[in-house]
Image (cartoon, rainbow, N blue to C red):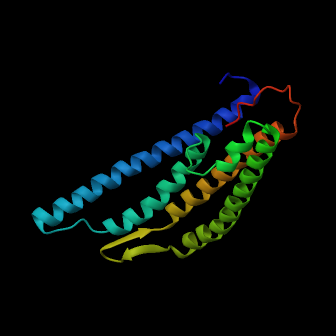
Amino acid sequence: MTDHPKSSGRSGFITLTSIMNGLGSLMIIAITLLICSDIIGRTFFGRPVPGVAEIVSLSILAIVFLQLGHAIQADALARTEIFQSMISGKYPRASAFLKATFYFVAALLFAALLYGSWAKLVDAWVTSEHIGVYGISAIPVWPVRVVVVLGSAVVTLQFALMTYREIVKAFGPSSKPESNIK
């Protein structure tokens, strides 16, 4: 991508999703090491690592929301496109409209998730919500709620951008070159 003024914001968004994806990958490595440490501690020393189950359960949720935006950007979501592939060659505008509709509905769903998650984030922050057992391992929930809110916002924006791209394909002039928005 060039350093064209219009593409710099898009490039920043791609960088954000890449950083989030990288953080999710690092979290996978960290929880793998944590689980291995817990197994070694239990087996050889009779002392498990406290809070592993809670940390892993929160981490899985965080990993999903950290990596989802990048997966959508890379077009790596699993889906069935039987009908889509049947019409894409013969009716490219109809195919683009169908994709735009799918992306728009997905953007609405993640916007609703963002809206609902914001209230849960505020509640977790205000009440100092924790999981686990106080005195042994009490892990705050708000950092994961932040990741869910940020991930939902990124995914909503990603689907909105993809909706725009497909609307341009469906209703724009046919001689217009393909957009590089992903």
Q: Position of residue 146 (x, y in %)?
A: 56, 59
Locate residue 81 relative to residue 57 in the image: left or right: right
Q: What residue sits 24% from the left and 65% below the top?
A: 49
- Residue at point 49%, 58% (across, down): 62
Relative placement, left or right, of 171 versus 45 is right
Q: On the image, which quarter does residue 5 sit in?
A: top right
Residue at the spot x=63%, y=56% of the render?
A: 152
Q: Nearer the viewer, residue 58 or 64?
A: 64
Quadrant assignment, res 164: top right
| Residue lying at the far left of the rendered structure | 44
Q: Position of residue 145 (x, y in %)?
A: 55, 63
163, above or below 108, in the image: above
Provide residue 163's location: percent of width, then percent of height: 76, 46
Q: Residue at x 80, y 39 (%)?
A: 91
The answer to which image quadrant residue 50 occupies is bottom left
Viewer-nearest residue: 180 or 13: 180
**In the rendered image, the vertical position of residue 116 relative to residue 16, given as above or below:** below
Quadrant where the N terminus is found in the figure: top right
Q: How many marks?
A: 0
In the picture, which quadrant includes the C terminus? top right
**Image spot of residue 84 (x, y percent):** 70, 46
